[in-house]
Image: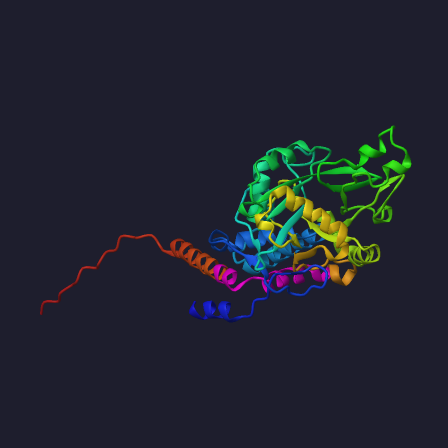
């Protein structure tokens, strides 16, 4: 055991979060794990990792689990049974595994757990989520309240989060009323909304609705141009060929930023599939790249974070911080935001990559564990081995049977 502990602590551990653009480690940026997170690291780590997978990767992971299960069942078969009995037993074992996987996903989606929080050493950097929801949105868990939204973002290390419910601003306004007086004294929630605009789902920062000016019959085309236009963010998944470039005209305004990372599995898939296109659009149009959790109340994992540098933001009011973020996106544009994400395996697209995914996923998972997480894994594995050995010992201990000593015959000469 001592050797395993020393091995876990001595093996190099790489930082699990990197720049989403360059893939390089950012100085002074890392993850913090609470004691509670580390105590159940095998659970929290696996559930976090599952939250970062695309649908094909989920299927590959499930296939890998069932394949390993089949190999184990074949190797462990010792007792000779009839074909019918054996088939019944193995079918039951497979159903137990399927139920265990369903329980894993259900617990991961519904049960709150300790979260990995991003930490940045620079006190002037604001960690922002540009797109999140509450139960007011039609496709969100109804119990995901404003308070739970705030707690979720606090647990993931965010300083500021925009509540962008579908066509509803009321929850975000209620959330703003509970903000701390100073932005640095707690997790700040700012108003936004997600709207269907020019055939796209767009995240809007602030309280203004971009469709209002377009629908105002008293305004002519010239008056509509940039009149109080809010900051618009192109979300993914979406058809990027329909994205409107920045600027305003008689038809309305374009986007000022585009999501490079989105926590929705479909968004992650598009980010992997069209990463180069998204980067090229941001560079050519000079618009900001951002990350969004797009949290819908399911799970306790943040996949990516947006970093915005605002000197002295901690002493500002929350509304001033929001105004400054929007001004920076408009003025600094492509240079306004730094996106940080977990190291992720890209979604497999070709046959060889798809075939290798069941092997690559567990290897990638193990490579990104911290030393303390590895130590927690070793402790749990050893506890499991000891418990299993104890059970086997109880089963193999024979029952106590009565014994009789034969009478000793003495020969008399």
In the image as oriented, which residue stretches furthest toward the top? Answer: 217
Residue that extends furthest to the left in the rendered view of this protein? 413
**Does residue 365 belong to the magenta stretch?**
yes
> Predominant secondary structure in magenta?
helix
Q: Residue at left 61%, top 50%? A: 313
Q: Nearer the viewer, residue 326 or 274?
A: 326
**Residue at coordinates 72% horizontally, 35% vertically from top-left?**
166
| Residues rendered magenta in the picture | 355-376
Colour scheme of the picture: rainbow
Q: Quadrant of the C terminus?
A: bottom left
Query: Is 276 inside the magenta-drawn segment?
Result: no
The answer to whether residue 308 is left or right of residue 212 is left
On the image, the x and y values in percent for residue 249 come to 88, 42
Q: Residue 206: horizontal and vertical position, in percent?
A: 71, 39
Q: Nearer the viewer, residue 156 or 346?
A: 156
Task: Tell me if I can see residue 141 in this picture.
Answer: yes
- Closest to the observer: 371 or 365? 371
Give x and y (percent) for residue 175. 60, 36
């Amino acid at each position: 055991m001592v050797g395993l502990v020393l091995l876990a602590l001595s093996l190099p551990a790489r930082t699990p979060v990197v720049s989403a653009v360059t893939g390089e480690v950012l100085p002074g940026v890392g993850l913090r794990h609470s004691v509670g997170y580390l105590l159940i690291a095998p659970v929290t780590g696996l559930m976090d990792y599952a939250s970062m997978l695309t649908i094909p990767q989920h299927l590959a992971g499930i296939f890998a689990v069932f394949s390993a299960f089949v190999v184990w069942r074949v190797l462990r078969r010792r007792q000779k049974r009839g074909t019918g009995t054996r088939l019944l037993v193995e079918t039951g074992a497979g159903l137990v595994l399927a139920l265990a996987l369903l329980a894993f996903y259900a617990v991961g989606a519904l049960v709150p757990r300790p979260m990995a929080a991003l930490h940045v050493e620079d006190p002037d950097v604001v960690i922002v989520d540009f797109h999140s929801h509450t139960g007011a949105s039609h496709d969100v868990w109804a119990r995901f309240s404003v308070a739970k939204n705030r707690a979720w973002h606090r647990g993931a290390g965010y300083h500021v989060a925009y509540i962008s419910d579908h066509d509803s601003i009321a929850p975000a306004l209620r959330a703003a009323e509970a903000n701390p007086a100073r932005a640095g004294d707690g997790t700040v929630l700012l108003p936004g909304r997600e709207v269907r605009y020019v055939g796209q789902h767009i995240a809007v920062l602030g309280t203004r609705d971009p469709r209002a000016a377009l629908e105002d019959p008293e305004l002519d085309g010239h008056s509509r141009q940039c009149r109080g236009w809010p900051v618009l963010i192109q979300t993914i998944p979406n058809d990027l060929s329909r994205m409107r470039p920045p600027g305003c005209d008689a038809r309305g305004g374009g986007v000022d930023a585009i999501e490079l990372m989105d926590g929705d599995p479909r968004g992650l898939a598009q980010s992997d599939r069209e990463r180069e296109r998204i980067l090229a659009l941001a560079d050519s149009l000079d618009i900001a790249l951002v990350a969004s959790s797009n949290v819908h109340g399911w799970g306790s994992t943040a996949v990516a974070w947006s970093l915005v540098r605002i000197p002295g933001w901690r002493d500002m009011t929350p509304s001033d911080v929001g105004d400054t973020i929007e001004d920076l996106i408009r003025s600094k544009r492509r240079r306004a935001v730094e996106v940080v994400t977990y190291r992720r395996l890209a979604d497999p697209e070709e046959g060889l990559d798809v075939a290798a995914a069941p092997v690559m996923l567990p290897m990638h998972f193990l490579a990104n564990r911290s030393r303390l997480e590895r130590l927690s894994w070793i402790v749990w594995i050893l506890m499991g081995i000891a418990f299993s050995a104890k059970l086997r010992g109880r089963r193999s201990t024979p029952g106590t049977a009565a014994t009789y000593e034969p009478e000793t015959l003495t020969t008399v000469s």
